[in-house]
Amino acid sequence: MIRTIFEVIKKDLKLLMRSKFSSLVILLTPLLIILITGVALENQTNFYITVGTYSQSYSHLSKSYISNLESNSVIVEYFDSEQECIDAVKIGKVHACVVFSPDLRIEEKYNGFIRFYVDYSHLNLAWIIKDLLFTSAEQESKEISQNLIDDLISVVELTNENVDKEKAELTNLATSNDKLSSIFSTLYSYISVLHPEYDLSKLKISDLSDAASSLKLKSTGVISLASNKLSELSSSLDSLKSTISAMNNSEVEATLLPKIDQMKADIVSYQQLLTSNKNSIESEAGALESYISNLKSAIDELSQILNQVKISQEKSIEYVNDGKQEAVNLLNYIFSLQKSINEIEKKIDEINILSSGKIAEPFKTEIKSVTPEKQSITLLFPIILSLMILFVSLVVSSTLVQMEKQSEAHIRNITTPTKTIVISLGIFLTTLFIVLFQFIISMISIAPLVNIPNFFLRFSSALLLTLISSPVFILIGILIGSLSKSEQGSLILTILVALLLIIFSGMIYPLEGFPRGFQMVLKLNPLYLSNYFYNQVFVKDAALSQMLLQILTQICWLIGLFISLILLQDLFDEKFLSRHTTKALHRPKKKASNKRANSQEYAKLTKLLLELNHILSPKNKLTKDQVDEAKRLYLEALAIYQKLDKRTKEEFFDELNLIHKKLSAL
Amino acid sequence: MDPEVFLKVEDLNVALNDNLILKDIDLKVYKSEILSFVGVSGSGKTTLLMTLLGLIKPVGGDIFFAHKTKKGTVFKSIFDHLDYFRSHVGFSTQESSFYRKLSIQENLEFFGSMYSLPYDVLKQRIAILLDLFELKNHRDKIAEELSGGMKKRLDLAISLIHNPLILILDEPTAELDPVLRKEMWYFIKKINERGKTILLSSHFINDMESLADRIAVLSDNQIALIGTPSEIREGMGLSDQVVIETTPGNYDNLLKIFYNHKKIGLRNHKISMNHLTLLVNDSHSALVEIIKILENSSEKIINLELRKPPLEELFEMLP
């Protein structure tokens, strides 16, 4: 059986290679794909993205954002309206549209915006565009945030400083408040002890007035009396004097008269004094009266004032009480304020981070690649390889099966003791050989273009994984080829199956976009697994042990498909035989006789050749006439031969050739 | 000595798509004979051969092959021992069954390996077959570049690669000109001389006369006649032909007279290439009457001959 399989492989390879087109495709396709992609994407790490932009008026901020974009290799195109920009995205002229609010700035009452329009139908590219735009926006925002935060922090610091100060002030305030409170209390005590009500009648002003009047009277009376007495005295003195004088004692006169004069002078002065005193007493009494009157008025006023004072006192007491209460409240407020300030202080103290950078970006977020390489060709290579393996496996295997089925030889193969499954196995191994060949070519071609460390060490893992994945696709291709009735049908089915596998492999649309349950099913997709393998090996340098589950899944596919093929092979053979026998039984018959009936030339030529064969039969010894006749017939036959179509000519060629040789020999 | 029976067909009924193609076929195939199946298109020749090959399962009856055991010859159903039977059968259909893109040598090697022939045996056999079919000088030629005759020879060679006991050939000379056809019969004869039993179908009944040991005539989904060529001719009950060529050649009027003339015993006629062929019971007695009629007519005799009808013509005259 091994020899038979080997012969089948040999036969298939020969059949493929002898078709120039097939051999070119098999040899060159992987090379071309890898070379073109490699050269195009060599050292390429960025995506060339074009972004449209619009704003009624660009501010410094919006221009800064645009510069940011341009620094990330984004080509920016300006549009005259938002709609124009959006339309440009729709038709694919630009990949995204950024619209800035007019005069974009940071202000409390200004509602600025940066609006992005992205075409999500680009799927993978959409995320990249979004990431790029948002990264730029984020960068810009971060810078602005940082500046704002710097301002805030300085305010906080200032607040902190002021809080300390104000705390002290509050304490003073509290102290002052205490004092105030005690002042109020004292005031209250002072005010409260005031009894501004006074019975003014006690003052007995009228008595005073009477007394004053009486005193005036009495004073003036006294004075008058005194004056009178003095006058009497003076008169007395005068009398004395006169007496003395009468005495006509000189010594006594010398001694007493002066004195009596003096006394008289004194009395006069005293009288004058008394008079003045009387006058002044009178005036003073008058003044006193007016004072008393004033006093009365003053007392009245005072009474009023006292009333007012009383009222004021009452009010003051009220106010003092209020004041006291307010002082208490104020104290409470002060305490509350103190508490708040303490809390604020505590909170401010609790703020560990005061660096604007830290606040704007508390955690340094950075997206790092799990692999060192971001070269596009390196990232794309697993996908290219998976697709190449898929298409080569599917197309070559299904084509070989169809070639076998459509070949006239297949009916003969079915009737030999060799089971058709052996032929299928041969096709399987032939395709596998071709796939491995292309795989090796791809590896050799891509090696200089990608910067994958230990490339050839990873090659062995990739080879093993190819030996697991490729057979799955080959078996699918064999099943497709076996199921299809024609080459076209096989090709269409191959393309459909490939499309289904690709759509649900995550290469176009992430599997994570599907419902969770469905995702689990999709992760069984052999193409998903194949791509996963190559990604793990080439991009992430993962060990095979890390992919055990996926490898097992792929092996399960392999076993399942192989069993299906074995089970279905008899059914395929039956169907083929049924189609073949129907075709054979309905085959147009009597082609040769139709020609014979309808083609006079064919019939004539046949007759001529028969005659010639008869004449030139080795048994006959030819005469000259017979030779001439033979030559004549030969020329006639040649003339008819020239009129025949190419295919009919082929039928007669050997025979004519033989006759020519025989004639030449004669 | 009774010829050894190699294949037995008993009560065979074959239907395809609910149409009964063959009914009540009873047949014995003897060892080393050439049995030819003839019949009009649609008579079931190909169906019978494909059923004999085991490619079509009958709806009734069976086919048995002789299997020699120590106890003697036992007949086994081919359908129960298909693989074994097929390993002893070679076949060639109207369309050649080989790989057009492989050379003669490669085709023979491939099909030899499909029969799991040991390499040295295969090599030997290839050499013999190339010699037998005169393909030695063309062994490395790609099959599609061969002429029609060589393709047919290659096909035959492939069908013999595993040295089968029986060869089934369906229209082996279709699309071949008479010269190549003759060549093909020559090779078939050579094969038969090596002891191979050959079953073949052909439209060329004339060729079968000289080639086949027996001819089976299929008509109306059954074997109408089976026997040696002479037995067939006798079975058809027609022995003689009178071929006339006259001028101006108004055969219609003559035919009216001939058919009404009882002594001529005209069974059927054919007009081709200005010849009028009359199938009569007795050519000699008919000839006398025919000449009399012709002499009395306005027709001038150009040619007049008696001959035994080739089977093909008899066959075409079958109702």
Image (cartoon, coloured by chain):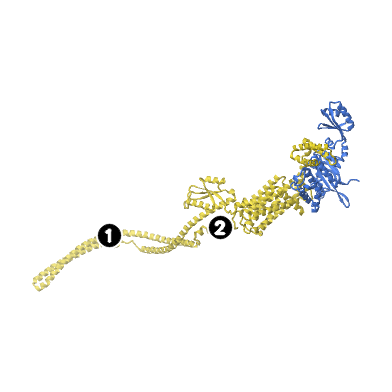
Chain colours: A yellow, B blue
At 30% from the left and 62% from the top, the residue drawn is: A202
In this view, the residue farthest toward the right is B1
Residue A324, located in which quarter of the rendered image?
bottom left
Q: Quadrant of the N terminus of chain A?
A: bottom right
Spot occupied by residue A333 in the image (x, y as percentages of width and height)? 44, 60
Q: Amino acid at mark 2?
A: Glu
Most foreground residue, B44 or B287: B287
As measured in the structure, the alpha-carbon distance from the residue carrying label 1 to the one carrying label 2 is 97 Å
Q: Residues within 10 Å of mark 2 (few under 14, many from 20)?
A: few
Q: Is residue A120 left or right of residue A494?
A: left
Q: Is residue A586 visible?
A: no
Element on which disc 1 rests:
helix
From the top left corner, tell me how far across and down residue B179 is, in percent. 80, 40
Looking at the figure, which quarter contains the C terminus of chain A? top right
Asked if both marks, 1 and 2, belong to the same chain, the answer given is yes
Q: Amino acid at mark 1?
A: Lys
Chain letter for mark 1: A
The answer to which of A460 and A106 lies nearer the viewer is A460
Q: Could you tell me residue A664's position as x and y percent?
A: 79, 41
Q: Earlier in the sequence, mark 1 or mark 2?
A: 1
Residue A355: x %, y % from top left = 49, 60
Chain of the residue where label 2 is placed in the rendered structure = A
> Quick one: SS at disc 2?
loop
Look at mark 2 in the image and give the residue it sits on: A366
Question: Which residue is denoted by mark 1 in the rendering?
Answer: A296
Q: Judge depth for marks 1 and 2 and give the one in front.
A: 2
Is A104 in front, or is A441?
A441
Identify which residue is drawn at 53% across, 59% down: A362
Residue B8 is left or right of residue A4, and the answer is right
Query: Does residue A203 sit above or below A580 in this rendering?
Result: below
